[in-house]
Amino acid sequence: MNDYFVYKSDMSPHEIKRQWIEKLCPGQVSELFNYMPDTLYFVKDLELRLMAGNQTFVERCGFQTEEKMIGKSDREIFPIEMAEKYMNDDRKVIASKEPLIEIVELFPNQIGEPEWFVTNKIPLFDQDGKVAGVCGLVKSFEGVRTSLQPYLDLLPVTEYLKNNSASKVSMPDLAKSIGMSVRKLQRRFQETFKTSPQKYVGRLRILEACELLVKTTLPVTEIALQVGFYDHSAFSKKFSELIGMSPRDYRKRLHPLSPPSAPPLPIPPKENS
């Protein structure tokens, strides 16, 4: 925990925001808009709690007013896989004291569905020169289509992987369907998404498992089978690696009223997914 800013439990959101902003060098937030006008913006403190945002951003977060948003974290607003990505980037900015520019990532659109956006983040400093938080701008890919063209070129691939994440994907067949060699597809995918198609599918399976853990009471082993894993231990290991906790701990945290899981089902001795 960071104790740079200490808030009392009886302080109002406005008082929290006022005391925090008073520590900042004047003009940092407004200066950022000189470079990227007409975009969503947000400001966070060192604990990665939202301290400010324009009305469009506030509404994307599901609030009517900025006051209701103040003090909230990404985990309270966005799907866990999105929230963890946003917060990891925030931590990089704070630790390095350097901006992160043109982050291509998923962000909710006007109706709450994930779409590709480009985000720019800069560190904020107080009057003593210490890092005090993060400010970011989020811009739709429509304004940066050139930067996103590699992702658009691979859209048929990502859509296919998304729709067939629980099945074993044939890379030769997939490459042939878009007129590429397997080697070229692997290379283009790695360059664009910084991961292989196989690992990308693994992450999709974990995201689907997150949904099932929260929205259903299916046993963990059954969920593992349903999303495409053939080994319970491999599923738990991959889940913990990406989410930071076990599937059962994740369910307890986000779905505390769910009944205990049933005994594990027998798992066929197939090759690990």
Image (spheres, rainbow, N blue to C red):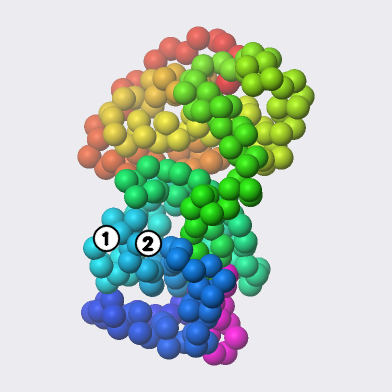
Side of 32 relative to 258 (left or right): right
Residue at the spot 41% in from the left edge and 20% down from the top edge: 226
Q: Residue 94 in the image: x percent, y percent?
A: 58, 69
Residue 24 is marked as: none
C-alpha span from label 1 to label 2: 9 Å
**Which residue lies under the disc numbered 1?**
63
Secondary structure of the residue carrying numbered label 1: loop
Q: Residue 140 in the image: x percent, y percent?
A: 48, 53
Which residue is at the far right? Answer: 183
The image quadrant where one finds the C terminus is top right
Residue at the spot 39% in from the left edge and 48% down from the top edge: 109
Say which quarter of the image contains residue 195: top right
Secondary structure of the residue carrying numbered label 2: helix
For marks 1 and 2, the one nearer the N-term is: 2
Q: Is residue 108 magenta?
A: no
Residue at the spot 27% in from the left edge and 42% down from the top edge: 256
Q: Residue 248 in the image: x percent, y percent?
A: 38, 36
Question: Hey, what amino acid is under mark 1?
Answer: Phe
Is residue 10 depicted above or below 159 in this figure?
below
Q: Residue 4 in the image: x percent, y percent?
A: 48, 80
Question: Hey, what amino acid is under mark 2?
Answer: Phe
Q: Give 19 or 263, whichever is nearer the viewer.
A: 19
Please state the extent of the stretch shown in magenta in the rendering. Answer: 122-133
Residue 260 seen anywhere in this rendered image of the structure: no
**Which residue lies under the disc numbered 2?**
57
Q: Residues within 10 Å of mark 2 (few under 14, many from 20)?
A: many
Is residue 250 depicted above or below 171 in this figure?
below
Residue 30 seen anywhere in this rendered image of the structure: yes
Is residue 175 depicted above or below 257 in this figure?
above
